[in-house]
Amino acid sequence: MYAAIRQAKARAGTAEELARRIKEGAIPIVSDVEGFMGYYVVYAPDDTVTAISLFNNHAGAEESNRRGLAWVEQNLAPLLAGPASATAGPVIVHTLP
């Protein structure tokens, strides 16, 4: 299993609009990547937004970040306090109930 992680700092008070745009725009783009297994977004109290996508191969995680960053730049830039960053790699520990 591989994870693609994108992170950015949001402008205060934009959580609801970010969530709406991500649901409508980012999820269809990322979930269409071959090997897609899941997608999660975390909004931290300091306005850091972290998107985590899971894939069954490294190429899918990398492609997800490529597509995801391009989408963020085109669709979320006015809601962010700076540029987004991305990383991808193997999941080395996980558990499910």
Image (cartoon, grey):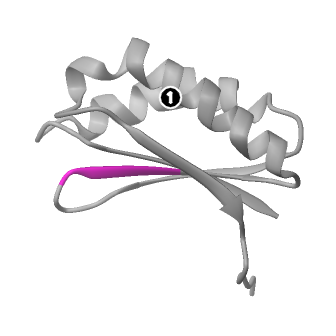
Residue 89, above or below 79 = below
Taking the spot 50% from the left edge, 28% from the top edge, the residue there is 69
Residue 75, above or below 40 = above
Q: Amino acid at mark 1?
A: Leu
Give the quadrant of the C terminus. Answer: bottom right
Secondary structure at badge 1 equals helix
Q: Seen in the image, is 27 located left or right of residue 81?
A: right
Q: Residue 39: x percent and y percent?
A: 64, 49
Give the quadrant of the N terminus. Answer: bottom right
Q: Residue 12: x percent and y percent?
A: 11, 41
Q: Residue 19: x percent and y percent?
A: 40, 36
Q: Seen in the image, is 47 located left or right of residue 70?
A: left
In reply to whether residue 19 is colored magenta, the answer given is no
Q: Which residue is mark 1?
A: 69
Taking the spot 63% from the left edge, 53% from the top edge, the residue there is 88
Taking the spot 73% from the left edge, 79% from the top edge, the residue there is 92
Q: Which residues are magenta?
A: 47-51
Quadrant in the picture for residue 20: top left
Q: Residue 83: x percent and y percent?
A: 30, 32
Quadrant in the picture for residue 63: top right
Residue 17, above or below 8 = above
Quadrant in the picture for residue 82: top left
In the image as oriented, which residue stretches furthest toward the left? 12
Secondary structure, magenta segment, majority class: strand
The one of 31 and 19 positioned closer to us in this rendering: 31
Q: Seen in the image, is 94 located left or right of residue 67?
A: right
Taking the spot 19% from the left edge, 62% from the top edge, the residue there is 45
Q: Number of labelled discs? A: 1
Dot 1, how many residues are within 10 Å of its Cα: few (below 14), some (14-19), or many (20+)? many
Residue 13, above or below 76 = below
